[in-house]
Amino acid sequence: MTETPSKTGLEGVIAAAKQAPGRGLPPVHLWHPTHCGDIDIVIKKDGLWFHEGTPIGREALVRLFSTVLRKDPDGFHLVTPVEKMKITVEDAPFIAVRVDKVGDTLKFLTNVGDEVEAGPENEIRVEMDATTGEPRPYLHVRRGLEALIARPVFYELVELAEERETPEGLRLGVASGGAWFPVGPAGAHLP
């Protein structure tokens, strides 16, 4: 009986990701292979994925890679049961491209097809860019991976926001899933 040789590199990542049943995610948090080096994949600030300097144009392939992405203390990696390859992420690996208010919950959609409900498990946070002073809003997606909230989506959040008194003073924020998230200073949404 002949064994099929195991695939390595990009082929191995594709094969491991395809083993996930349905749209479920592979259990990358349970896989602890040794580090195999870096792979020339870069996720740009705008959410586009590049391999060896060329955009990965197939959405299905990007989605597939996103399912085996993991954030470790030393950076971002594509992980299979037998390999761990470091990639470059310029900001957040995903972009939140849509938000819908359903009852008391904000439901987001990412550029790779993840559906995320904001709440205690998936927090919204806003940083201020040190250079421009512009807000940089993020949504926790899964296991330490975040999505940058696209500017039009952030504007929708600001429109939904209400002012509340906080220990830091009056703040503008949104509620979702039983949690409240500050998104800016009081009066930020007023003309």
Image (tube, grey):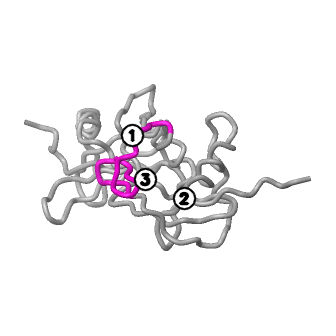
Taking the spot 27% from the left edge, 40% from the top edge, the residue there is 154
67 w.r.t. 161: above or below:
below
Residue visible at 62% across and 47% down in the picture: 17
- Residue 31 within the magenta-colored segment of the rendering: no
Left or right for 126, reference 141 = left
- Disc 3 vs disc 1: which is toward the camera? 1
Q: Does the CB distance between marks 2 and 1 fall below 8 Å?
A: no
Among the two numbered marks 3 and 1 on one chain, the one whose residue lies closer to the N terminus: 1
Q: Residue at x 52, y 63 (%)?
A: 77
In this view, the mark in front (2 or 1): 1
- In the image shown, does 65 or 6 lie closer to the viewer? 6
Q: Which residue is mark 3?
A: 146
Label pair 3/1, CB-CB below 8 angstroms: no
- The crowd level at tag 3 (other Cα within 10 Å; few <14, some 14-19, many 20+) is many
| Image coords of residue 8 (percent x, y) | 63, 60
> In the image, which residues are magenta?
42-60
Q: Position of residue 2 (x, y in %)?
A: 87, 54
Give the distance between the C-alpha atoms of the residues marked 3 and 1, in whole angstroms. Answer: 22 Å
The answer to whether 101 is drawn above or below residue 163 in the figure is above
Q: Amino acid at mark 2?
A: Leu
Q: Is residue 18 left or right of residue 152?
A: right
Give the farthest residue toward the right.
1
Q: Secondary structure at mark 1?
A: loop
Check disc 1: other Cα within 10 Å, few if <14, some if 14-19, many if 20+. few
Q: Which mark is residue 151?
A: none
> Which residue is label 1 attached to?
57
Q: Earlier in the sequence, mark 3 or mark 2?
A: 2
Q: Amino acid at mark 3?
A: Glu
Does residue 115 lie above or below 95 as drawn? above
Residue 174's spot in the image, x, y percent? 34, 41
Give residue 78's mark: 2
